[in-house]
Image (spheres, grey):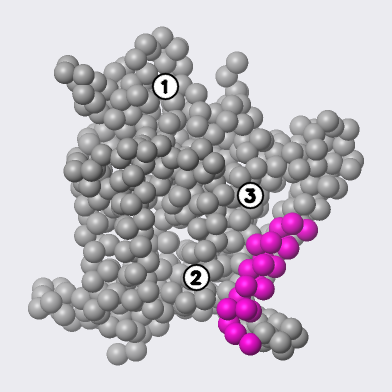
């Protein structure tokens, strides 16, 4: 039986709305957007390597670490996974595949989230270790590395293994999009049940037998698809469906977190320890990434160095990340799961029970990422203007004037209530998901709610600390 869905208002379908519908259904729209982002990425690479070394005056660091990250989370909150829809890396990969046909299938042992989760941790770690926000050249090198990685992986392996199993940005988007208000799903399940060709996943064939429109490269069968996990919003399934039965439909955000049906491409959430671990990294990574930008981190780093005789920044950072993404989650999440299990009569093991309930942390983690990235975006919202002016002037174009280095954004005090609002939004959603997952168990509600309160309090404390204005201070 279909899982009952909460309904507050009639469902909105963005693919049938007056403005968004024609735009999204037109295949050229994605090409245009991807081309624009590719031009932007190439400009960031060129400026990163050959532009000014001062980060607040360079396209790579300002656009990459201030505007891209802020726009990413805002889009996820407003619609869904729009970055993967617009991904310039996939655009270049598709161009390469016109000349090179992949021959291999992705190894079964790597068909999980462990590799991509490790790469996400590596990016967070490298961001702090190498001060990427202050290094245009290293930021440009990271973008080049991304292009190289997808070209190599997807030139060798069929379908889209990089997106599904490797891409750390994609995994971040997948977890965050669990809280998005829209999802790709069938408008009428009966139409899917009667479909004989399953074009949404196999692709639509031309009269000569060739594939005229590919189906979902991430192997998500729309009839059995639940929510946004692994969905890149590429709309290939929409283009391939011969019945026009697929919509981008509104839903209650976070609803899929307590939906325990088996879902295409993922299976049961409650059995996916790798996905649950990704949610934990997503949540605690949000706290740790913010901690690296506030004043107390310097005092804590100095204390660690003196107390344990650590002589390098690398050693200190290894300890901090070991505590933040290893010890703390193990004690807090594991301890919460053990307490909840202790006061329940259940056949589930402590680990299985913890995996099932850990998804309640996703809204809180997303709220923290929203608060943190929106701080940088809002306080530096106009900083791209003088940087673009400077970049154009360097190539002899002065059509938009000389750099107006005084442009910035909102004050810290003006941004703070918005940050708190995002934290509150994540807190309320996390509690709601906890109640849904608890199945009436008071012990579960109390234990997991206590952890959520603790993490929320930590988030508010972090936001109240002086935070580095990365990419928003200019010296002319």
Q: Which residue is mark 3?
A: 277
- The numbered dot on residue 126 is 2
Helix, strand or loop at disc 1?
loop
Residue 415 on image: x %, y %:
50, 69
Viewer-proximal residue among 178 and 169 = 169
Residue at figure coordinates x 61%, y 67% from the top left: 288
Can you say whether 156 is above or below 122 in the image? above
The answer to whether residue 366 is visible is no
Between marks 3 and 1, how big is the CA–CA gap?
Answer: 32 Å
Residue at figure coordinates x 76%, y 49% from the top left: 449
Q: Are marks 1 and 2 in contact (CB under 8 Å)?
A: no
Q: Are marks 3 and 1 in contact (CB under 8 Å)?
A: no
| Dominant SS type (magenta) | helix
The answer to whether residue 183 is visible is yes
Rendered image quadrant of residue 295: bottom right
Mark 2 Cα shell of 10 Å, populated few (<14), some (14-19), many (≥20): some
Q: Which residue is mark 1?
A: 187
Mark 3 Cα shell of 10 Å, populated few (<14), some (14-19), many (≥20): some
Viewer-proximal residue among 181 and 18 = 181
Residue 437 on image: x %, y %:
71, 36
Viewer-proximal residue among 217 and 423 = 217
Q: Which residues are magenta?
A: 311-331
Residue 291 on image: x %, y %:
61, 72
Between marks 1 and 2, how big is the CA–CA gap?
Answer: 43 Å
Q: Nearer the viewer, mark 3 or mark 1?
A: 3
Mark 1 Cα shell of 10 Å, populated few (<14), some (14-19), many (≥20): some
- Give the position of the N terminus as an image quadrant: top right
Residue 199 on image: x %, y %:
33, 21
Rendered image quadrant of residue 371: bottom right
- Give the position of the C terminus as an image quadrant: bottom left
């Amino acid at each position: 039986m279909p899982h009952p869905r909460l309904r507050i208002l009639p469902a909105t379908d963005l693919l049938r709305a007056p403005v968004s519908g024609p735009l999204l259904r037109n295949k050229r729209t994605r090409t245009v957007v991807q081309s624009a982002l590719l031009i932007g990425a190439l400009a960031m690479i060129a400026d990163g390597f050959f532009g000014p070394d001062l980060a607040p005056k360079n396209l790579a660091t300002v656009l990459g670490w201030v505007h891209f990250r802020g726009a990413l989370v805002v889009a996820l909150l407003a619609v869904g996974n729009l970055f993967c829809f617009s991904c310039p890396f996939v655009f270049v990969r598709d161009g390469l595949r016109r000349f090179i046909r992949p021959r291999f299938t992705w190894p079964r042992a790597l068909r999980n989230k462990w590799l991509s989760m490790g790469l996400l941790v590596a990016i967070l770690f490298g961001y702090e270790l190498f001060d990427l926000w202050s290094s245009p050249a290293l930021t440009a090198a990271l973008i080049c590395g991304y292009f190289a990685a997808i070209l190599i992986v997807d030139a060798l392996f069929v379908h889209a293994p990089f997106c599904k199993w490797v891409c750390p940005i994609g995994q971040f988007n997948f977890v965050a999009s669990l809280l998005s208000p829209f999802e790709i799903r069938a408008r009428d399940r009966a139409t899917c049940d009667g479909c004989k060709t399953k074009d949404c996943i196999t692709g639509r064939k031309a009269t000569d037998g060739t594939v005229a429109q590919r189906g979902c490269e991430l192997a998500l069968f729309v009839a059995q698809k639940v929510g946004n996990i692994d969905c890149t919003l590429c709309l290939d399934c929409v283009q391939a469906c011969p019945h026009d039965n697929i919509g981008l439909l509104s839903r209650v955000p976070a609803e899929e977190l307590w939906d325990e049906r088996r879902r295409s491409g993922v299976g049961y959430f409650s059995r996916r320890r790798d996905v649950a671990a990704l949610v934990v990294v997503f949540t605690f990574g949000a706290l740790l990434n913010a901690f690296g930008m506030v004043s107390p981190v310097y005092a804590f780093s100095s204390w660690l160095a003196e107390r344990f005789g650590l002589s390098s920044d690398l050693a200190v950072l290894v300890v901090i990340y070991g505590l933040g993404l290893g010890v703390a989650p193990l004690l807090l999440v594991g301890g919460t799961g053990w307490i909840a299990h202790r006061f329940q009569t259940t056949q589930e093991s402590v680990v299985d029970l913890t995996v099932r309930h850990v998804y309640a942390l996703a809204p809180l983690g997303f709220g923290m990422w929203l608060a943190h990235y929106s701080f940088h975006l809002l306080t530096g919202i106009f900083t791209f203007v003088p940087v673009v002016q400077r970049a154009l002037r360097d190539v002899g174009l002065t059509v938009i004037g000389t750099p107006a280095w005084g442009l910035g954004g909102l004050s810290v005090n003006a941004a703070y209530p918005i940050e708190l609002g995002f934290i509150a939004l994540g807190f309320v959603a996390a509690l709601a998901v906890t109640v849904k997952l608890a199945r009436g168990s008071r012990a579960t509600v109390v234990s997991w709610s206590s952890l959520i309160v603790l993490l929320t309090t930590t988030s508010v404390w972090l936001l109240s600390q002086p935070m580095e204005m990365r990419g928003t201070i200019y010296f002319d």
